Image (tube, rainbow, N blue to C red):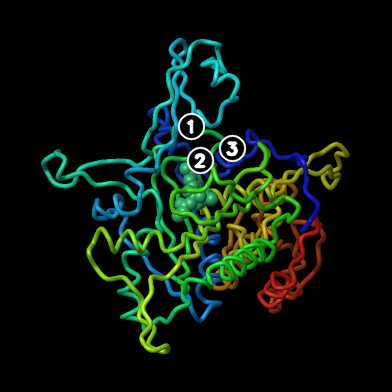
Amino acid sequence: MAEELQEYQGPATMEKITSLAKRRGFVFQSSEIYGGQSGAWDYGPLGIELKNRIQRYWWKEMTQLHDDIVGLDAAILMHPRVWEASGHVENFTDPLVDCKKCKARFRADQIDPDKLAKKECPECGGELTDTRKFNLMFKTHIGPVEDTSSVIYLRPETAQGIYVNYKNIIQSNRMKIPFGIAQVGKAFRNEIVTKNFIFRTCEFEQMEMQFFVKPGTDEEWFQIWRERRWKYYEKMGVKMDHLRWHRHGPGELAHYAKDAYDIEYLFPMGWKELEGIHNRSDYDLSRHMQYSGKDLKYIDQDNNNERYIPYIIETSAGLTRSLLMLLCDAYDEEKVADNGDADDIRTVLRFHPNLAPITVAVLPLMKKDGLAELAQEIRNELREDFATDYDQSGAIGRRYRRQDEVGTPFCVTIDYQTKEDQTVTLRFRDSMEQVRVRRADLVQRIKEEIKNYKRIK
Ligand code: GAP
């Protein structure tokens, strides 16, 4: 593991990331024309492309590359007893305090313990209320009558949809322990404090995998999944000295966890959780057995029909939080003089080409003399294989910068020489190097560049 950095030292700030995300169509404030809805965000044209790519990368890593993991897409609305069984109705709470003077609201575990003990508001010094428990689940009603019998929750984690289906999947897909079920989907939490852009929101997406194992093998599988999840980020190409492990102490463990590690990322606002890896023991399946009255024991047909309640190793990553992590990780500024100005600063998102929302931008040097038409033709040759963009407005240098700022790894420029000899200029985002490539070789060359990509900074 790389030596641990103490604090963030890169060029990104949350203000710069938020502003770029809005300006270039990654993320918009929800319901902005009404003043915005806190805790909710909308993903614009580039944001949804980036989110889809992260999701596809995760899905491939967790299902396609494993014989023993299958997928699921369970409903967000579930029987309310699920959340009693899971312990969320009783335990999924945050400690809350309010300031009687300035009315600010805080999570008691996030303010200075001395101030909390003295009941002193960290913002105005006013008097704080007693700490009370606040359940994070969004509650609503199903059907036309709003009474206690119609209460239903928006799921606060995707995991429970997997547990209630684990027997269905064993039966329909003939799965044998050890095996896993992967799922990506929305989750909802009534978070008291939503700040730092999309880091902690009330509506977000999770990428979760639940791995069912024989009791007694759980600690070994827990280590295996910790190692695999670490490698996942390495392969993704993120800065590994911005990742570290954090093991949950006894006071931090969730109500279901026997052991838990977070993978933390060094965001501009400091080290924060990116993903949790949990040994959930047989807690969830035992509770669902108890509350549903159904037998959820596994029958091991290869071992004299031995019956047991499996243990579960969970890997739980935030999809929207991963998107924020990638924006921060990719963000760079560098002094360049390619436009003739020695103090010019270029903003560049150094996404891995497999994750960049646009892979190739096609730019005609001029609109006239048939260059625009030729560029459109070349774009059409590329779009079957890559996510492409086309831009013909403004000086070429400025167009390169626009693509750098959204992380497009390759620009293809069409000029007068293209008309003569059917070659184009291929420009690389990171090095800004340009090479001449035959039009007929372009698709293959870009594919090779993606395959051999190494981040230089
Ligand atoms: N099923 C286990 C579970 O939900 P968690 O640690 O509460 O565990 C897992 O959440 C991941 O989900 C977190 O590491 C984070 O990436 C993401 N996450 C949790 N709450 C979030 C929120 N309010 N906004 C955005 N992402 C969140």
- Residue of label 3: 18
Identify the element where label 3 is drawn.
Answer: helix
In screen coordinates, is 379 left or right of 104?
right
Q: Mark 2 points at which residue?
A: 200
Q: Is residue 399 visible?
A: no
User: Looking at the picture, which amino acid does disc 2 mark?
Assistant: Arg
**Which residue corresponds to mark 1?**
193
Q: Mark 3 to mark 1: distance in Å?
A: 18 Å
Where residue 334 appears, x then y in whole percent? 81, 44
Indicate which disc, 3 or 1, sits on the residue closer to the N terminus: 3
Instruction: Specify the quadrant of the image occupied by residue 252.
Output: top right
Q: What residue type is labelled 3?
A: Thr
Asked if labels 3 and 2 touch by Cβ distance under 8 angstroms, the answer is no
| Residue placed most toward the observer, 308 or 348 | 308
Q: Position of residue 117 (x, y in %)?
A: 54, 20
Question: Going from the N terminus, do you reach mark 2 or mark 3 first?
Answer: 3
- Mark 1 belongs to which amino acid? Val
Which of discs 3 and 1 lies nearer the camera? The answer is: 1
The image quadrant where one finds the N terminus is bottom right
Within 10 Å of disc 2 (Cα), the crowding (few <14, some 14-19, many 20+) is some
